């Protein structure tokens, strides 16, 4: 594994990355429990993708860059500043949810405070949006960039092509990251694309492309950091493919046993970035049993508190049904 | 007051708004050096530069989607779709994204984009350069749809659309571009969206329409007055979504004989909704069945002049229908 010191990341930085990855995983696990307990209607998961999500978001300028995350990006939004309490409020569809006030399903992130543009369920519509934000940054001579993610299946949508091409023609400061988790619901990668690497598509757009091990947060951090530098230097967009594996079913309404084997999932769990990065931190004596216990306890306490708060928070009033159709 | 054509009024509205507000910019196909295939953006590239009058790749969903992204950032894009017929690849961006952005984010984000597109037939445009597309978008709360019937309205309504904090579709009749010209006031006035306009007062029949067919109805009304002494009461919808229900009900009640006109296909059209509003609210005011004049229910306007003429909602057809209703 690439060494974090070569990337100018301190021990504190990498421990923070791990804390964010672990928080994303534990929040996600709690949501599944709440779903199975009948308390929240739906979950769409980040499990298996936390490493690439946290690694990438960590490489952004969290004070000025824009993001257009997709529905699995719990690790991205946590890293960019969304709180566990806010995530629980969206899971419970409560009025205080900053993403949508309980109007959207969980995983449809958006926050003006965090410069995180609101997303929808039709996939990949966010790519042209991120390109439009980058265009506006360029027009206003702002050094901010926009970071957009999507799944590998979604990379077949017209909006992916139209957005990527536009960004390349106008040399816009955009980072497009495909989170290749091997499955579009039940359809495996080989039935989605015929190219060897999704980043090869960058050649056709005339932009930089790179495939990276999505289970390695440091490798993803490095690649996104370099893409950000290119974007800020006026060298245009980058297409990054981060490869990992979706460890859960597509959503709480899916049953992945109907299309893949338990052996395959178990094998992928051995490569899980949360597990391998934990080992890396132990190997470097950054993480110890004592530190880990403290971390887990703190995260559990935060999730417990957020869950209690969200559960008792009020739903949006029916009186607000007509609010926000127009200004 | 200078005499301006419909398209010159549109050009002037954009020019004034771009001069007034640095955030306003144009994106679309051929809008830059060429000044638009109809010349709607003529001179703007020279005046404001290629950063603010952007020739995009030929991809309508990106024109809408990139514009929506820029609008979320805080810019004020005017996106041009070269022909309304070609807006279909952008429908997902317009309906799933622009229309719902404010609502889905609980008022956190907004999308102040104007999407302009030339619509309508009678210009030998055949199936794919003649269509009226407004009905596709006219049941999507969050959107506004504006269709001006004259140069003065075109200028004032387009300025209002650009300044509007929400997404506006602005459909311009391509035959009106150079057919219609009039004195256009030299001022910065806007014409508010969402308000219909009573363009003619009368006591015999009520005509409700928008766009080019509204112009034809006005011409027909003059002839009917001179030839038969028929006085027409004419309401220009101006904004076809959401509709100005109060003005529609009031206009229908005025004469009790209502004719509704569109160039679009009849079924599920704007005037079908207008008809429903009148039906729900004016039962005891009506003295005749509501009459709807619209394009025939064939997929789109054919190329051959004979077929095009048979399809078009012409001034002659409108005049005859108005006369028939007056005599009912």
Image (cartoon, helix red, strand yellow):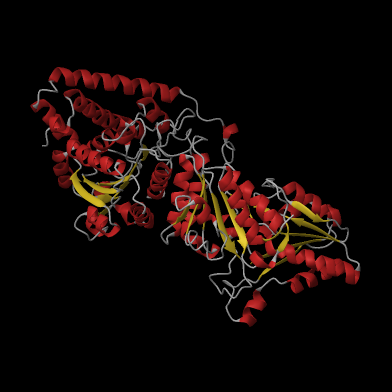
In which quadrant of the rendered view does residue B290 lie? bottom right
Q: Name the residue nearer the viewer: A281 or A271.
A: A281
Q: Position of residue A199 (x, y in %)?
A: 23, 52
Q: Name the residue nearer the viewer: B218 or B328.
A: B218
Name the residue at the right extreme.
B229
Q: Quick check: can you spot residue B119?
A: yes
- The quadrant of the rendering that contains the N terminus of chain A is top left
In which quadrant of the rendered view does residue B188 lie? top right
Horizontal relation, residue A195 to residue B251: left or right = left
Q: Quick check: can you spot residue B281?
A: no
Count of labels in the image: 0
Q: Name the residue nearer the viewer: A188 or B236.
A: B236
Q: Position of residue B47 (x, y in %)?
A: 53, 53
Up/down of B128 relative to A316, above or below: below
Up/down of A17 relative to A145, above or below: above
Horizontal relation, residue B180 to residue B25: left or right = right
Name the residue at the left extreme.
A283
Q: Position of residue A115 (x, y in %)?
A: 41, 35
**Which residue is pictured at 62% across the width and 70% down the height?**
B121
Up/down of A169 relative to A109, above or below: below
- The quadrant of the rendering that contains the C terminus of chain A is top right
Q: Position of residue A261 (x, y in %)?
A: 19, 49
């Amino acid at each position: 594994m690439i060494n974090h010191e070569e990337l100018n990341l301190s021990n504190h930085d990498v421990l923070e990355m791990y804390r964010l990855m672990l928080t994303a995983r534990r929040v996600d696990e709690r949501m599944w429990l709440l779903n199975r307990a009948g308390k929240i209607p739906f979950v769409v998961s980040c499990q298996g993708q936390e490493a690439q999500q946290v690694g990438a978001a960590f490489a952004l300028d969290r004070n000025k860059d824009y993001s257009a995350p997709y529905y699995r990006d719990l690790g991205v939004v946590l890293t960019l500043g969304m709180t566990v309490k806010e995530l629980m409020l969206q899971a419970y569809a409560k009025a205080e949810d900053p993403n949508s006030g309980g109007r959207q399903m969980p995983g449809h992130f958006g926050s003006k405070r965090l410069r995180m543009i609101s997303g929808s369920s039709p996939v990949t519509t966010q790519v042209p949006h991120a390109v439009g934000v980058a265009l506006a940054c360029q027009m206003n001579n702002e050094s901010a960039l926009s970071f957009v993610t999507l799944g590998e299946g979604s990379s077949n949508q017209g909006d992916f092509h139209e957005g990527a091409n536009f960004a390349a023609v106008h040399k816009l400061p955009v980072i497009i990251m495909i989170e290749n988790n091997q499955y579009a619901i039940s359809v495996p990668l080989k039935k989605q694309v015929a190219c060897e690497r999704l980043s090869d598509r960058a050649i056709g757009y005339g932009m930089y492309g790179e495939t990276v091990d999505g289970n390695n947060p440091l490798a993803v951090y490095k690649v996104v950091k370099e893409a950000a530098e290119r974007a800020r230097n006026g060298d245009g967009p980058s297409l990054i493919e981060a490869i990992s594996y979706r460890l859960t079913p597509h959503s709480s309404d899916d049953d992945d046993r109907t299309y893949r084997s338990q052996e395959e999932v178990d094998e992928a769990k051995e490569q899980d970035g949360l597990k391998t990065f934990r080992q890396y931190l132990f190997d470097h004596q950054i993480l110890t049993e004592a530190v880990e216990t403290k971390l887990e306890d703190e995260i559990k306490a935060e999730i417990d508190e957020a869950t209690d708060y969200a559960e008792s928070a009020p739903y949006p009033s029916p009186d607000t049904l007509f609010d926000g159709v127009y200004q | 007051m200078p005499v301006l054509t419909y398209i010159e009024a549109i050009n002037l509205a954009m020019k004034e708004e771009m001069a007034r507000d640095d955030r306003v910019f144009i994106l679309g196909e051929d809008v830059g050096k060429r000044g638009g295939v109809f010349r709607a953006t003529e001179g703007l590239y020279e005046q404001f530069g290629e950063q603010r009058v952007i020739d995009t790749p030929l991809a309508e969903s990106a024109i809408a989607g990139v514009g929506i992204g820029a609008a979320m950032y805080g810019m004020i894009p005017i996106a041009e779709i070269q022909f309304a017929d070609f807006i279909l690849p952008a429908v997902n961006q317009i309906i799933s994204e622009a229309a719902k952005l404010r609502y889905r984010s609980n008022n956190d984000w907004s999308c102040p984009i104007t999407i302009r597109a030339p619509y309508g037939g009678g210009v030998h445009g055949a199936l794919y350069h003649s269509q009226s597309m407004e009905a596709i978008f006219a049941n999507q709360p969050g959107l506004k749809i504006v269709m001006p019937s004259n140069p003065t309205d075109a200028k004032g309504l387009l300025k209002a659309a650009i300044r509007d904090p929400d997404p506006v579709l602005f459909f311009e009749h391509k035959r009106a571009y150079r057919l219609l010209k009039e004195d256009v006031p030299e001022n910065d006035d806007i014409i508010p969206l969402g308000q219909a306009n009573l363009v003619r007062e009368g006591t015999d029949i009520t005509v409700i329409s928008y766009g080019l067919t509204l112009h034809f109805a006005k011409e027909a009304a003059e002839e009917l007055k001179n030839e038969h002494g028929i006085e027409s009461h004419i309401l220009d919808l101006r904004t076809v979504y959401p509709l100005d229900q109060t003005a529609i009900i009031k206009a229908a009640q005025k004469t009790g004989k209502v004719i509704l006109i569109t160039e679009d296909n009849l079924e599920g059209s704007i005037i079908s909704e207008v008809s429903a509003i009148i039906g729900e609210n004016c039962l005891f005011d009506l003295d005749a069945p509501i009459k709807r004049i619209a394009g025939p229910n064939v997929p789109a306007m054919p190329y051959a002049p004979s077929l095009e003429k048979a399809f078009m909602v012409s001034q002659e057809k409108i005049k005859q229908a108005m006369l028939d209703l007056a005599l009912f």
